Image (spheres, coloured by chain):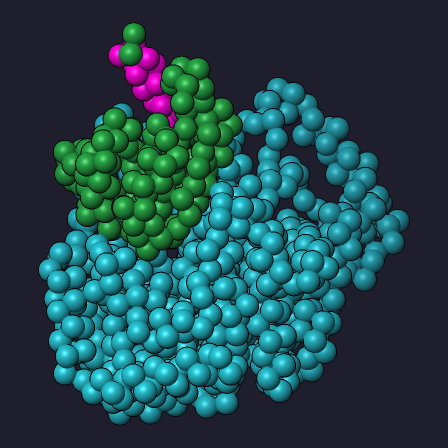
Chain colours: A green, B cyan
């Protein structure tokens, strides 16, 4: 694959488990595409293992998980662990949706890089991703 | 100009007003009075539009606007309790009885649901909604590895008849109705409830069981589907037919337009998608040999109201009228019962914010008032102000229940029938919505109906576009939302208690279902599951074999899987998901 600065960011958007609320992930998908990124959607009802394997197969830079039920405290740490174990710990792992404040430390410690809760501005998410990409480029140089 | 002679020469219409004279006066007012004022005080925004439809809003509505939409009192409104039911389906509005006041509940294990349900009944509520966890609604048992972390979280965990036997430890004399939300596995869920009521010795005639049975909306936007759409429709039809034939006082189907609204359907899409979906079920049920005047009264709608007060009020009024017209014009229904819509209304949770959550109490009160003014229908359910944070907490339940009583007893909105009727704006908007919804329905019928619109992804893509556009309105400031993009607090401290389910619930539920499997008559279970597969293949009604299976304590997931063996599973790619 081309270096990160010479191609669009590749983003895998995922819904883990039985949570099927898709408005947030739909809006994000449209916004990221509009910003020139390549967006792949896993479909509904994925396990952490299915998402980790899709992330590796699709060779994405970013994995974004949308969660609106309360299962995130278990599924997200599992996904982070599976990515690390598969040597894909450098992928940016984002979470979004309904995530209570007090769950942040647990998720961040488990390896979630950034949490965007309900009401986050898609322009902030795009800016964050672009900045992350710029940092990655600097690290490479 | 503005003297009595100008009016005396006018030729009054039947309504007693002369629209031409009023239009002329309105023009004069614009030139003499409003124009100069607006020149000196420019308008706050370039364009005023309704929130969801983005229809242009005039500065002023007069009888001339009613004439422009061809408004006719007798044809468009009539009287309450009579065709076309625009002014309500109840002849005396809410002067005889208030709507039934309900709230959503359901979490954890059966016993916990029962405790919470008793608390809610004690707060003055008379109806309950039973919501299940996502393991249950997607057709899995609690110990299935696919549902790890979800057990008992978004609703009650229901693995077997035993769980419902515990949940139904309730004062059934206080409970007027019970709604159950379990769409994809509906025949299994229906069978469980029937068997549990039997065990409790409750006469099925003493309460109204409402099953939502709303699989087509699951494919459209919610996503809790199991089987392919045509099989989903068949299972829903099985439940409708079974209830009509065996429990005629129950409600076998709810069209939850309130799930289309959070998926950002605008009011016209909400009416057209819901009603065309209703038609898909009706067509399938008529093929079972029932007639429209029998079938139509069983249809029930749950309709959300969003923060645009007038879109909300007019949507409820247009909904009633569109249903009435559809039943009469498309199906040739002849009885009033068939033509009057049954509906439950609710303020939408999507208007609530995570930021400054107490503001949500204000939003909910306003939306509940819009529901009441639009004609609340048989019942109203109020979400809770902390839902954006997490699942409902106890104080929020009390405030939510009190809110409905405040609207009912303190505001006066229920003291006369349909008090906003005759408002030039309300009637114009109501009529515009009706016309647009009928045009959209024609388009859907031309595609082959709602099932085809789902199978082709038409509904899903239309909603995906709305979702993106409505979010842009917000981000680019065309719509102001307090706490989100207006009056934001620099730093916010959360002050609201969040309800947390103990993690041990999942472990307990898993050992409970495993323990059950070890002590039941496995041969009876296997035989019953084979009968379920046979019925699935043969096209027989699925409810009786599910009922037999439930009574052997076959689990929810096992029965759903027996049907998976026959139907297969639905998989939606991003095209069919509208993403």
- Can residue B238 be seen from the camera position used here? yes
- Can residue B422 be seen from the camera position used here? no
Residue at 46% of width from left, 29% of height from top? A38
Residue at 49% of width from left, 79% of height from top? B537
The percent coordinates of residue B186 (x first, y second) are 41, 73
Determine the main secondary structure of the stretch shown in magenta. helix
> Which span of residues is magenta-colored?
A125-139
B192 sits left or right of B84 in the view: left
The percent coordinates of residue B408 (x first, y second) are 39, 64
A111 sits left or right of B445 in the view: left
The percent coordinates of residue A16 (x first, y second) are 31, 48
Residue A104 magenta = no
Q: In which quarter of the image is residue A141?
A: top left
For the residue pair B62 and B396, the one nearer the viewer reads as B396
For the residue pair B294 and B406, the one nearer the viewer reads as B294
Vertical position of residue B574 compared to residue B32: above or below:
below
The N terminus of chain B, quarter of image: top right
B510 sits left or right of B198 in the view: left
Residue at 23% of width from left, 65% of height from top? B142
Vertical position of residue B204 compared to residue B177: above or below:
below
For the residue pair A82 and A28, the one nearer the viewer reads as A82
- Quick one: which residue is furthest to the top in this view? A141
The percent coordinates of residue B137 (x first, y second) are 35, 65
How many marks are shown on the rendered structure? 0
Residue A130 magenta = yes
Residue at 29% of width from left, 40% of height from top? A52
């Amino acid at each position: 694959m081309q270096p990160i600065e010479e191609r669009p960011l590749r983003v895998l958007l995922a819904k883990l488990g039985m949570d099927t609320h898709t408005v947030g992930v739909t809006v994000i998908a449209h916004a990221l595409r509009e910003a020139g990124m390549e967006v792949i959607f896993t479909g509904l009802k994925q396990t952490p293992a299915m998402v980790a394997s899709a992330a590796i197969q699709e060779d994405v830079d970013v994995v974004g998980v949308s969660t609106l039920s309360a299962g995130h405290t278990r599924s997200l740490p599992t996904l982070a662990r599976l990515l690390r174990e598969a040597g894909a710990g450098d992928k940016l792992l984002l979470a979004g949706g309904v995530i209570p404040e007090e769950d942040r430390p647990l998720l961040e410690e488990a390896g979630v890089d950034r949490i965007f809760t309900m009401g986050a501005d898609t322009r902030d998410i795009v800016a964050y991703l672009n900045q992350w990409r710029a940092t990655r480029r600097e690290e490479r140089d | 100009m503005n003297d009595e002679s100008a009016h005396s020469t006018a030729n009054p219409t039947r309504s007693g007003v002369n629209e031409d004279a009023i239009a002329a006066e309105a023009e004069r007012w614009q030139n003499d009075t409003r124009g100069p004022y607006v020149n000196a005080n420019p308008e706050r925004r370039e364009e005023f539009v309704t929130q969801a439809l983005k229809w242009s809003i005039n500065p002023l509505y007069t009888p001339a606007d009613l004439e422009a939409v061809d408004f006719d009192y007798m044809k468009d409104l009539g009287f309450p309790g009579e065709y076309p039911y625009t002014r309500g389906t109840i002849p005396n509005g809410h002067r005889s009885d208030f709507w039934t006041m309900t709230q959503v509940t359901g979490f954890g294990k059966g016993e916990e649901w029962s405790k919470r349900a008793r608390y809610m009944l004690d707060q003055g509520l008379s109806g309950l909604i039973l919501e299940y966890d996502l393991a249950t609604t997607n057709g899995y048992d609690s110990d299935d590895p696919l549902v790890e972390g979800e057990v008992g979280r978004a609703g009650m965990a229901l693995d077997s008849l035993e769980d419902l036997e515990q949940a139904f430890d309730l004062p059934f004399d206080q409970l007027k109705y019970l709604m159950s939300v379990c769409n994809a596995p509906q025949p299994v869920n229906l069978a469980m409830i029937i068997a549990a009521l039997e065990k409790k010795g409750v006469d099925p005639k003493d309460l109204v069981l409402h099953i939502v049975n709303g699989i087509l909306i699951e494919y459209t936007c919610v996503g809790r589907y199991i089987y392919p759409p045509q099989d989903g429709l068949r299972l829903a039809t099985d439940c409708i037919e079974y209830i009509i034939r065996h429990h005629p006082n129950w409600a076998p189907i709810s069209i939850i337009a309130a799930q289309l609204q959070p998926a950002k359907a605008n009011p016209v899409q909400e009416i057209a998608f819901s009603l065309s979906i209703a038609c898909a079920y009706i067509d399938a049920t008529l093929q079972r040999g029932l007639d429209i005047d029998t079938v139509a009264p069983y249809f029930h709608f749950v309709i959300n109201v969003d923060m645009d007060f007038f879109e909300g009020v007019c949507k409820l009024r247009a909904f009633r009228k569109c249903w009435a017209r559809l039943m009469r014009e498309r199906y040739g229904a002849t009885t009033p019962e068939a033509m009057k819509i049954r509906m439950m209304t609710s303020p939408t949770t999507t208007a609530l914010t995570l930021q400054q959550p107490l503001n949500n109490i204000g939003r909910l009160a306003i939306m509940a008032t819009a529901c009441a003014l639009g004609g609340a229908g048989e019942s109203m359910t109020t979400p809770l102000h902390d839902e954006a944070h997490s699942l409902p907490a106890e104080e929020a339940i009390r405030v939510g229940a009190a809110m409905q009583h405040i609207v009912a007893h303190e505001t006066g909105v229920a003291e006369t029938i349909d008090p906003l009727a005759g408002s030039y704006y309300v009637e114009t908007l109501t009529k515009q919505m009706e016309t647009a919804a009928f045009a959209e329905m024609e388009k859907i019928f031309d595609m082959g109906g709602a099932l085809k619109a789902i199978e082709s992804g038409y509904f899903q893509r239309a909603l995906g576009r709305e979702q993106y556009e409505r979010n842009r309105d917000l981000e680019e400031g065309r719509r102001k939302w307090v706490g989100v993009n207006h009056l934001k607090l620099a730093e916010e401290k959360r002050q609201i208690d969040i309800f947390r389910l103990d993690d041990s619930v999942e472990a307990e539920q898993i050992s409970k279902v495993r323990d059950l499997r070890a002590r039941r008559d496995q041969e009876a279970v296997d035989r019953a599951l084979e009968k379920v597969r046979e019925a699935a293949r043969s096209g027989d009604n699925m409810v009786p074999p599910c009922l037999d299976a439930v009574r052997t304590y076959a689990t929810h997931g096992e029965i759903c899987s027996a049907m998976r063996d026959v139907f297969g599973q639905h998989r939606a790619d991003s095209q069919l998901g509208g993403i």
